[in-house]
Structure formats: C-alpha cells, structure tokens
Amino acid sequence: MSAIKLLVLPCVAALLHAQAPTPPMGWNSWDCYGTTVTEDEVKANAEYMAKHLAAHGWKYIVVDIQWSDAQAKAHGYRANAELNMDGFGRLLPAENRFPSSGGGEGFKPLADAVHKLGLKFGIHIMRGIPRQAVRGNTPIQGTRWKAEDVADKSSICQWNTDMYGVDVTKEGGQEYYDSIVKLYAGWGVDFIKADDMARPLHAGEIEALDKAIRKSGRPMVLSLSPGPADVKQAAFYAAHAQMWRVSDDFWDRWVDLKKNFDLMAPWSGHSRENSWPDGDMLPLGRIGIRAERGDDRRSRFTPVEQQTLMSLWAIARSPMMFGGDLPSNDPATLALITNDEVLAVNQKGSKPRELFRKGEAIAWVSDAADGKSKYLAVFHSGEGPTVDVRVDWTEIGLSGTCVVRDLWKKADTGRVSEGQTFSLSPHASGLYRITPVK
C-alpha cells in the first residue's frame, strides 16, 4: 500500500466518525407506533418533516425496533418471533409492512424516498445475530464462517428474544458486523440506533459495529441504547459513537422528566461535537397509537411541562428525536418544536453544565456562539409553591448590566444589573439569553 493511501485511510475513517457536529434532530417511530410502524406511516411523517420542520434543522427519520417482524403487535414483543431474514443471517424488512422492500430491495426504496425529501434515513437494530440464523447455521457473507461459529448463546438481551450476542474475539465475529453494515450502506442508511449495547456495556460489539461503519465507506450516525450509560465510560462512548442514552426509556410522566435532571447533570462537560449524551426521545404530540406503553393519546405532559422538557434538552444539548406522530401535531406542538431561538441553544451552545441545585430550584448554563453571551435555563422541579431562582451574573461569568432575552417569548425583557430573580411555578422553567451591555 502506498504512503498516500496510508495517510488517506485514517482521514476517511475520521470523517466517517464526524457525522454529528451538532445534536441530531429527527423523528423516531417508537413512541407512537412501537414495534408496528408501516411504510406509509414512515412516509407520512417524513413528508410532514420536510414541509414543516426541515427548515428548523430537523432531518432524521428513524424506523425503530422489529421492522423485520411481519406479525408485530402493540404493547410489547412477540417471544421467539419468526423474522424476515436473508440467506446470510441478516434481517430484512417485513414485506407486508414495507411493500417496497420486496424483491431483495430492503429499505433502499424507502430510504431513497426519504432522501428525495432532503432528509436522512435511519433504522434500529438489536445487538448480535438472529437466533434463527444460529438455528439454521447460516453462512456469513463472503467468508468461510457460519452463524454457529460466532454466536455467544450465553449473551442474550433480557427483554427481547430475537438475538444472541456475537463473540467478536472469534474469527468471523467482526465479519458478521461488517456484513450487516454493508447491507445497510447499500440501502442508504444514515443513522443506526443500536440497542442492547450501552447498558450493560458490550464494549467489544460496540467497537465491532463502529469499525464496520468506518469500513463501509458510508457516513452513518451511531446511537447506542439503552441507558442510563455509565459516565465513567464517557471516553469510550465518545470514541465509538455519536450519541448514547443517559436515561432508560423516557415517557410522558413528570417522574421521568424529574429523574432526567439527575441523569443529565453528571454528563455536564461531555457534550461536544460528534459526542452527545442522549436524554431519549421526546414523547410529545400524539403518542401511544400502537406503542409499547399506554394507548392512543396526546402527551400527558402539561404545556408547562412540555416547555420544561424542551428547555432541559436544549440547554443540555441532548439529541432531539420527536416521538409523536407528526401529521397529528396541533399548532401548539408545532410551535414548541420550531422555536428557532430555543433550538439555537441546542444546536449552537457549548459547554452545557448544571450551574447549581438549591432544593427544588435548578439552573443550567451554556456558552453562546458569539463568545460573549450566555444561555441560562432555570427550573422548578418540585411540587410546592412558587420558587424564586436567583442567578447573579458573576455566577455565569458575566458582570455589570446585561440584556435579558426570553427565548420562549422571543422578546427582550429589559436591562438588568448584577443578576435576576426568576419566579417559577411548580414544574415550570425559563430559558434566556444573557448578553452583556457594551
């Protein structure tokens, strides 16, 4: 191999890893359709995103779990389900749910349709190799090894019966991961949500999947689930993925949202280009249509709680994956997720960190892109009466008189010297840009 090639290959690998310069924003089918989403539903959500959200930075359309199960049902998984699979032990879309996938096309026609809208296409996968591939001892594409050679039957998911782990220390283990990513690259996949990876940590298989993506030559964002991830492993996650879950499945309950204050805080300082601690999907709008938890409903978060959710995800720079059925959005939900001043905190802020926690009063801060201003979020996480959250400008690295802009109202509230006290009702929040007066 020439010296030029030796130099180029590491550069290409680095570029393939650099797929998320800002926190990814998109839609995921899980909160509204669970295991049962269909091609028409994916297209409808993509068309809505292209028309109403793309101009605000939303771009990923992600098909979540069990897309290979022709008989998938709401409220859970089918034990030992027979999945659609090719002759090399690689799962394929169920043709009754994704008609364009017939004839060996896989997700390519659907991905092409999403790409034509100017968006990016993603899929969910489970860690490992299908158990039915092991039962049939299918060959691994392009190798002399078979499924039995690489399967670790002792390594199983605790909540899904589809897969065995892959022993990547054995010959053929890396090659299996290479083979599935090669398939996804051919389909035009831009985003992989890899489940049963992050908790407990399956380091070897994460490394193998990351390596396969780099070898594929196609840029793909790698998202690891479930959470909560271990903050002690932050450097490992950042080296091998672009986002990783810091919470377990997050639903439309205040108890879940309150817990995420505790889960996100230890990750202060770890959000940076191509490395995004992930608070999970946004269960907003219409969810539960055919989901794992609950029935068809509007999000149970109150309007005040929805704003708090968006404020926390924005200031913490968590990826934003909308979980509701987009075509069912009402004007209030659409307004909530298209406030460009709020989204700028998520996309353009830097060094997000919890500033303090004083009883039920919580404050976060991050640096604005101009190098002078600060983004400030204040929260009332309790059930009691209104609380006053006092923030002195010196606490956020500023001094003197500052202009306070309310980002939710898109309006300056005035010039304030030394600091400000924010009065908040239970579960409420405020999100501001604080700019020093010249």
Image (cartoon, grey):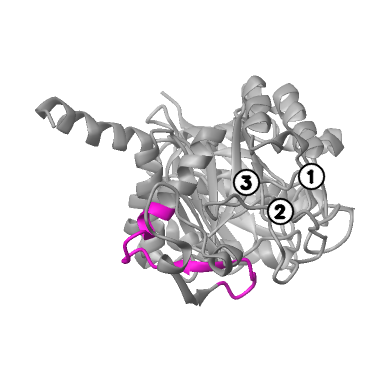
Q: Are marks 1 and 3 in contact (CB under 8 Å)?
A: no
Q: Is residue 222 left or right of residue 308?
A: left
The three-letter amino acid code for the residue at tag 1 is Arg
Marks 1 and 3 sit apart, C-alpha to C-alpha, by 36 Å
Of 354 and 360, which appears nearest the observer?
Answer: 354
What whole-number distance in Å separates the C-alpha atoms at marks 2 and 1? 41 Å
The mark tally for this picture is 3
Quadrant of the frame with the N terminus: top left
Q: Compute the Cα span from label 3 to label 2.
A: 10 Å
Can residue 422 be seen at all in this image of the molecule?
yes
The kind of residue tagged 3 is Ser
| Earlier residue among tags 1 and 3 | 1
Q: Residues within 10 Å of mark 3 (few under 14, many from 20)?
A: many
Please tell me whether the stretch drawn in magenta is mainly helix, strand or loop.
Answer: loop
Front position among marks 1 and 3: 1
Instruction: Please tell me whether mark 3 sits on a helix, a strand or a loop.
Output: helix
Note whether residue 416 is visible.
no
Q: Residues within 10 Å of mark 1 (few under 14, many from 20)?
A: many
| Image spot of residue 47 (x, y percent) | 76, 27
Q: Which residue is located at x 54 percent, y 74 percent?
A: 156
